[in-house]
Amino acid sequence: MRNSGTWWIIALIMLLLDFYVYQAIKTVTNGSGEKLRAVIHASYWVISGLTLAALLLFPYVQAFQTSKVFRNYVFAILVGLFFAKLVGSIFFLTDDLRRGAVWLMSKIFPNTGAQYMSESNAIPRSGFLSWLGLGMGTALFGTLLYGFSNKYNYKIKKLRLAFANLPEAFRGLRIVQISDIHSGSFQNKPAVNRGVDMILAERPDVVLFTGDLVNDRATEMQEYMDVFSRVKAPMGVFSTLGNHDYGDYVSWPSVQEKQANLEQLKQTHAQLGWRLLMNEHVILERQGQQIAILGVENWSAKARFPKHGRMDKAYPGTEKIPFKILMSHDPSHWDAEVKPKYPDIDLMLAGHTHGMQFGIENPYFRWSPVKWVYRQWAGLYEEDAQKLYVNRGYGFIGYPGRVGILPEITVIELV
């Protein structure tokens, strides 16, 4: 089985973590009765054994390959347990470093170190750090389980953006941006439909979709055509492609089949009634005044993502249009090409990051691990007269949930 060696390496790392965490389990149960201690220890190793078995069987069990629901949830639980134990191990390692320092001190200054030694001349583990590590790991795992319930918990983010050069006729224009639908991950059609109801309730003048309609295959949209074909607006629905739309993450039998999949996806946009912008622009007109909407294919400054976008094709013809909106899936495009080469792009709309579907957001603080990869990863960014908005994504992929960073419908009013 392809990449089975990788699974064995991961399983070995997991087993080592299991033994490390078990030391903390022994420490915190040291004062418990013998029967209770035996039950806790046995339960721990039963769970760990089942986890390792699932991990090793993952590449081989057919259900993992054919059932996306089964695969996604099992994989998420395995990853959650891994990171829970990893987080706990940070505290256990801190304790071991402390114990190592005490041991060293006992050798250098015997009288000083002796007070920390047990009767067996061993340096006992810290009950506090053991409890803290187990508590933090358990909290992380519980949070990830709770996040399963948030994947359809759509939130509307409203903002008013002011531009001095916005034509008078377009003041008050209502834009709804959605991004990263990832229809191949959905498992609850009524919930997805409720999200579309929320979009329509905002009465947008125009809807802009910034890529990743599917995970890999155009056929993923078949079950949801009737849902997303409801997304309409008086001035139109415009869309672009994201990195997942090209089918790059599937081993296709031939180049021709991969290309056919992309062509089918383009037709899917048309069947939805959405105007797919492939390195081109459209002009919107109101009361004799104009703005331009540019849409490019996926363009990323990150090496592992494609650079299909062609601003040199989308931009020409918009030079004299006083206000421009760019739809570009990957926010790294903004720093790498848009700002230095196209300073008259007033607003860029992107998605892609999902906010990693995990983080903390409140009025005073915003954090996600994805910030270590993407400088702009969620919300509004401004530099000079240019603005970038990064949508947190409508759908999900990989982890079937959301923690802190909830699925988003963006409503932008231009003023």
Image (cartoon, rainbow, N blue to C red):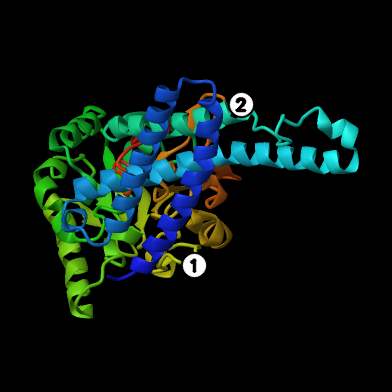
Disc 2 secondary structure class? helix
Classify the position of the N terminus by image quarter. bottom left
Measure the alpha-carbon separation of dots 1 and 2: 46 Å
Which quarter of the picture shows residue 207? top left
Q: Is residue 140 above or below residue 242?
A: above
Query: Where does the image place residue 391, in percent across and percent down from the top left?
Result: 40, 42
Which quarter of the picture shows residue 152? top left
Which is nearer the eye, 108 or 305? 108
Query: Which label is found at residue 127?
Result: 2
* Residue 373 visible: yes
Identify the residue at the far front of this view: 120
Which residue shows up at 72% across the image and 30% down it? 118
**Looking at the picture, which amino acid does disc 1 mark?**
Ala
Which residue shows up at 41% across the image and 23% down it? 36
Question: Where does label 1 land, which residue?
Answer: 303
Query: Where does the image place residue 374, in percent across and percent down from the top left?
Result: 52, 51
